[in-house]
Image: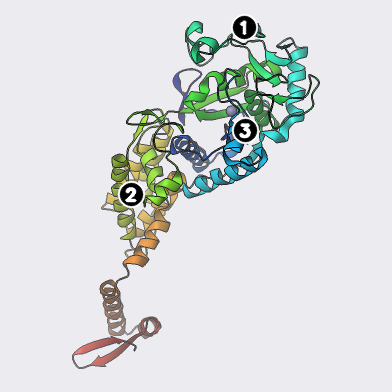
Amino acid sequence: MKLYNSLSHSKEDFVPHEPGRVSMYTCGPTVYHFAHIGNLRTYIMEDVLEKALRWEGYDVKRVMNITDVGHLVSDADTGEDKMLKGARRENKTVMDIARFYTNAFFEDCKKLNIKRPDVVEPATNMISEYIQVITKLIEAGHAYLAGGNVYFDTSTLKKYYVFNDHDEEDLAVGVREGVEEDQNKRNKNDFVLWFTKSKFEDQALKWDSPWGVGYPGWHIECSCISMKHLGEYLDLHCGGIDNAFPHHTNEIAQSEAYLGHEWCKYWFHVHHLNTTSGKMAKSKGEFLTVSLLEEKGYDPLIYRLFCLQSHYRNNLVFSWENLDNARAAYEKLIARVASLDGTAGGSIDGDTMAPYKTRFQEALDNDLNTSLAITALYDVLKAGEMNDATKLALIESFDMVLGLGLLDRAAALREKQATPAEGAEEIERLIAQRQAARKAKDFKTADAIRDQLKEMGVVIEDTAQGVKWSLQK
Ligand SMILES: [Zn+2]
């Protein structure tokens, strides 16, 4: 598989540290509100990546954190505490808020066919690990105590801006955020590992530490949770592109300073979901959630298809009109799958399957080109030389990666469509089959079909004019 690596700015062959096994880390949600569908785009594409790796035979272990310890609205170590903000808004405790929105997040994921990661670790479970790592960073001279907080000293690194060649001045925290500089910092990009002094005296969750009662910075949780569950060598780290700086940059800084060697090999960043008026945000305009999509009558998997139709490294523009187009495509797709009859026209044929599987895999291997993978799915539906059983087998296989619920939704549609007219067609077909069997003196089959019809409530009568049938009253 070739994947674009944000570290090298190029597509690279994906070669895990241990052959056949992939350690995969995903930055999880901050659980102070519902996730908006822009956040969920990232989780959908990460899910496809995980499933593609599994489909290709890798043994994947995926870990995700849950940011349930308040991290600040701004990465400049200022701004409001998001968790506390949520708790105040809803008049609940911070832990109630965390529990409620963690569940809500995984409910949304379920509706979008996003598999739950193998390990989900709330940040508040890991306080002793943060303290241990921070202690070692101080001892090694990579961190210092100033004004009551522990800071990471970015001047001890050979290179700090790992993802971009941005001008330091451009990204300097004070300048970027337009906020006043923290006077305790030795360098403007230094960041807090442990707070005991915050502008927010009423921080709800605090723990004892060698540096006083306080709480961890945001970045340290991902480094520690990843190292605990996935070891010192991480293959793949995922997240939204807006996390590349400063969050992932700081994760790398502290992890590699702690470990003394390269930590994570591949960085997979999903780009933004924009609205027609700009980047999607909770604070702007309509708050787009999975529940809202459902209220408006959209199957959440329509949104999943919408995301898969474009490449994860392109910004995607959301509008109701665009979603309607995805709905039309989804409904057509399901109808076509529903029209396939796996019981007619022969059994699964591995030989005709092979080139289609190859085409699908090539799409995945080309930096997770999901729109090409969907084209490969359409190619299967169109394939003239392929019987329905083979098509259905391929669709089932592809959908292990795409996660569009194709067979489930098709079965539901067929059930809905089982109108009297179609029922009659089916009965006629069975009667014709029975006649053919009788003609061939295959009475066993003929009797079996008669029994099947009887079970369906169909009474048959052999008359001089042929077979007559009626439904049992
Ligand atoms: Zn993270």
Question: How many numbered marks, from 0 up?
Answer: 3
Which sits in the foreground, 150 or 83? 83
Categorize mark 2 by other alpha carbons within 10 Å: few (<14), some (14-19), many (20+).
many
The foreground one among 149 and 92 is 92
Pinpoint residue 27: horizontal percent, then vertical percent. Answer: 57, 31
Give the residue at x 28% y 44%. 325
Kindly indicate whether the residue at mark 1 contacts the one at mark 2 (C-beta within 8 angstroms): no
Tell me the kind of residue under disc 1: Asn
CA separation in Å, label 1 and label 3: 29 Å
Vertical placement of residue 171 versus 344, above or below: above
Q: Name the residue tied to disc 3.
A: 84
User: Disc 2 residue type?
Assistant: Tyr
Which residue is under mark 2?
A: 330
Beta carbon of the mark 1 residue lies under 8 A of ligand 1: no
| Depth check, front residue: 219 or 71 | 71
Q: Secondary structure at mark 1?
A: loop
Going from the N terminus, do you reach mark 1 or mark 3 first?
3
Whole-percent x and y of residue 273? Answer: 40, 32
Ligand 1's quadrant is top right
Q: Which residue is mark 1?
A: 187
Q: Nearer the viewer, mark 3 or mark 2?
A: 3
Q: Residue furthest right?
A: 210
**Rendering coords of residue 448 (x, y %):** 40, 82
Tag 3: residue type?
Answer: Leu
Crowding near the residue tagged with mark 3, few <14, some 14–19, many ≥20 C-alpha atoms within 10 Å: many
- The mark lying in front, picked from 1 and 3, is 3
Q: Is residue 161 above or below residue 270?
A: above
Quarter holding residue 148:
top right
State if disc 2 and disc 3 touch (CB < 8 Å).
no
